[in-house]
C-alpha cells in the first residue's frame, strides 16, 4: 500500500492524465445531446430537473476551478483549476442551451394544448 501512496503522491503527470480523461468524458457526454437538441428542437425525453441539477453541478465546479487558481504554485500556466473551469464552462453552456430550448418547447406545447377544443 505504501508503494501506491508514494506513486500517487509524487506523480502529478498521472493526476493530469486522469483529469484530461475526465474532462474529455464530460464534454463528449454533453455535446452530442446539445447538438441533437439544437438540430431537432426535440426535448420531449429530456428531464428538466436532471438538467437543472447538472447545470448547478457544473457551476459549482467552475467556482472550484476559480478557487483552485489558474496557475500552479511556481506561477506556470495552466494550473489544475484551469482545466476544471474550462470543462465546466463547456458543460454548463450545453446545459443552459438545452434548458432554454426545453422551456421554450414546454411553454408553446402548453399553449397549443390550451387552444385545443375539448371533446
Image (cartoon, rainbow, N blue to C red):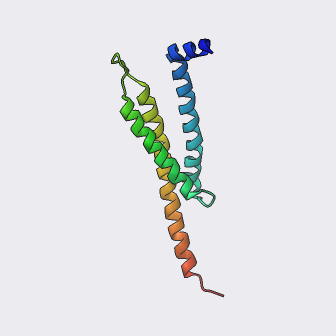
- Which image quadrant: the C terminus? bottom right
Residue 73's x, y, as percent? Answer: 35, 19
Q: Nearer the viewer, residue 10 or 119?
A: 10
Side of 44 relative to 66 (left or right): right
Kindly give the residue lying farthest to the left in the view shown: 75
Q: Nearer the viewer, residue 105 or 46?
A: 46
What residue appears at the point 54 percent right and 79 percent down from the top-left corner?
114
Residue 72's x, y, as percent? Answer: 38, 21
Residue 49 placement: quadrant:
bottom right
Kindly give the residue lying farthest to the right in the view shown: 119
- Work out whether 57 lies above or below 108: above
- Work out whether 2 lies above or below 113: above
Residue 81 visible in the current orientation: yes
What residue appears at the point 53 percent right and 52 percent down from the top-left corner?
51
- Which image quadrant: the N terminus? top right
What residue appears at the point 50 percent right and 42 percent down from the top-left corner?
91
Side of 95 relative to 118 (left or right): left
Residue 14's x, y, as percent? Answer: 55, 18
Amino acid at each position: 500500500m505504501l508503494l501506491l501512496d508514494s506513486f500517487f503522491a509524487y506523480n502529478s503527470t498521472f493526476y493530469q492524465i486522469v483529469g484530461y480523461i475526465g474532462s474529455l468524458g464530460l464534454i463528449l457526454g454533453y455535446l452530442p445531446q446539445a447538438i441533437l437538441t439544437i438540430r431537432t428542437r426535440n426535448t420531449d425525453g429530456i428531464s428538466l430537473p436532471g438538467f437543472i441539477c447538472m447545470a448547478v453541478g457544473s457551476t459549482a465546479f467552475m467556482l472550484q476551478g476559480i478557487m483552485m487558481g489558474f496557475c500552479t504554485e511556481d506561477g506556470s500556466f495552466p494550473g489544475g483549476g484551469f482545466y476544471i473551469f474550462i470543462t465546466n464552462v463547456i458543460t454548463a453552456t450545453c446545459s443552459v442551451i438545452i434548458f432554454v430550448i426545453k422551456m421554450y418547447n414546454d411553454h408553446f406545447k402548453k399553449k397549443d394544448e390550451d387552444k385545443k377544443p375539448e371533446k
